[in-house]
Image (cartoon, rainbow, N blue to C red):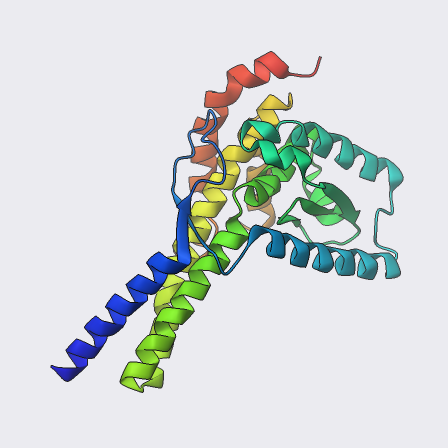
């Protein structure tokens, strides 16, 4: 009975900590794709501080790439990527007007890695491995760049950090009450199942949907997101099973993209580049 009371107390205190530490908010509007999910952000992780940290890390990564002679090696390729990114950036105000004032930046890193990312605040990179191995068209590059931009617009990094910090507070309280290290181990597993994996999948889906709309509004064919992920799945041999991955399976992702692409086709037809 004593343990039950302790766990109940820990749960209550942990819940209170969550309510105090986190604020319900929506970082973006829903757009035509209909993104509607309340997000919870901890006051312990401010947008400004996170963006400053991202800027420092970005500068360091660019410096390392430059020292390895891997930064923006192909001028024509870099200009192609920047032209696409700039057209997408011009559309971010639909989802959050303040993002139009962000100091967006994108570079091409010469690496065989099939990857692209966007840090908080709009600092981006795309790897030549993705461009070359998928033989990406402009529309497909718009899909992947838009997807990565969406992560920044929705502040997914800040959201995930907030969840982890609040969970850590709860585990600390539970460990102090029970005096058990097993509680922390169990809690770590629970964090992965209840927070990291599900929310990462949610984040990926939101980035897919928002990215498709950004591309359509910028005049890029949203259906290219489907062909891009088909190529990505082929490169990875079909991809990791969904329940073992933070990303949706290829088949799930493609099915959802097919629906989203059709929804934003009128935007594409209105804005397509002639």
Q: How many marks?
A: 0
Q: Position of residue 110 (x, y in %)?
A: 80, 51
Q: Position of residue 170 (x, y in %)?
A: 35, 70
Nearest the viewer among 244 and 35 is: 35
Q: Position of residue 160 (x, y in %)?
A: 48, 56
Residue sitting at the far bottom: 179
Q: Residue at x 65, y 33 (%)?
A: 100
Q: Residue at x 86, y 35 (%)?
A: 76
Q: Is residue 171 visible?
A: yes
Q: Position of residue 148 (x, y in %)?
A: 60, 43
User: Which quarter of the image is occupied by the N terminus?
Assistant: bottom left
- 60 displayed left or right of 140: right
User: Which quarter of the image is occupied by the C terminus?
Assistant: top right
Residue sitting at the far left: 1
Q: Is residue 249 visible?
A: no
Nearest the viewer among 122 and 255 is: 122
Q: Residue at x 41, y 50 (%)?
A: 23
Examine the image and state in which quarter residue 244 appears. Answer: bottom left
Nearest the viewer among 182 and 7 is: 7
Q: Residue at x 40, y 70 (%)?
A: 169
- 10 displayed left or right of 68: left
- 212 displayed left or right of 2: right
């Amino acid at each position: 009975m004593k343990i039950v009371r302790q766990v109940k107390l820990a749960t209550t205190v942990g819940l209170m900590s969550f309510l105090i530490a986190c604020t319900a908010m929506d970082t973006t509007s829903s757009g035509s794709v209909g993104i509607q999910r309340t997000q919870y952000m901890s006051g312990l992780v401010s947008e400004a501080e996170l963006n400053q940290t991202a800027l420092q890390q970005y500068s360091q990564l660019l410096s390392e790439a430059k020292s390895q002679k891997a930064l923006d090696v192909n001028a024509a390729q870099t200009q192609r990527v920047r032209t696409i990114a700039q057209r997408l950036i011009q559309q971010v105000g639909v989802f959050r007007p303040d993002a139009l004032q962000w100091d967006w930046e994108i570079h091409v890193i010469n690496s065989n890695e099939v990857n692209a990312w966007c840090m908080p605040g709009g600092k981006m990179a795309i790897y030549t491995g993705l461009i070359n191995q998928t033989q990406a068209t402009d529309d497909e590059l718009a899909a992947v760049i838009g997807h990565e931009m969406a992560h920044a617009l929705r502040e997914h990094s800040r959201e995930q950090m907030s969840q982890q910090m609040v969970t850590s507070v709860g585990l600390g309280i539970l460990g102090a009450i029970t005096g058990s290290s097993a509680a922390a181990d169990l809690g770590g597993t629970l964090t992965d199942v209840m927070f990291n994996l599900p929310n990462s999948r949610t984040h990926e889906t939101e980035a897919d949907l928002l990215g498709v709309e950004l591309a359509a509004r910028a005049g890029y064919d949203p259906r290219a997101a489907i062909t891009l992920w088909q190529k990505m799945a082929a490169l990875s041999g079909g991809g990791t099973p969904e329940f073992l991955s933070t990303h949706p399976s290829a088949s799930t992702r493609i099915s959802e993209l097919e629906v989203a692409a059709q929804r934003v086709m009128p935007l594409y037809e209105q804005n397509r580049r002639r």
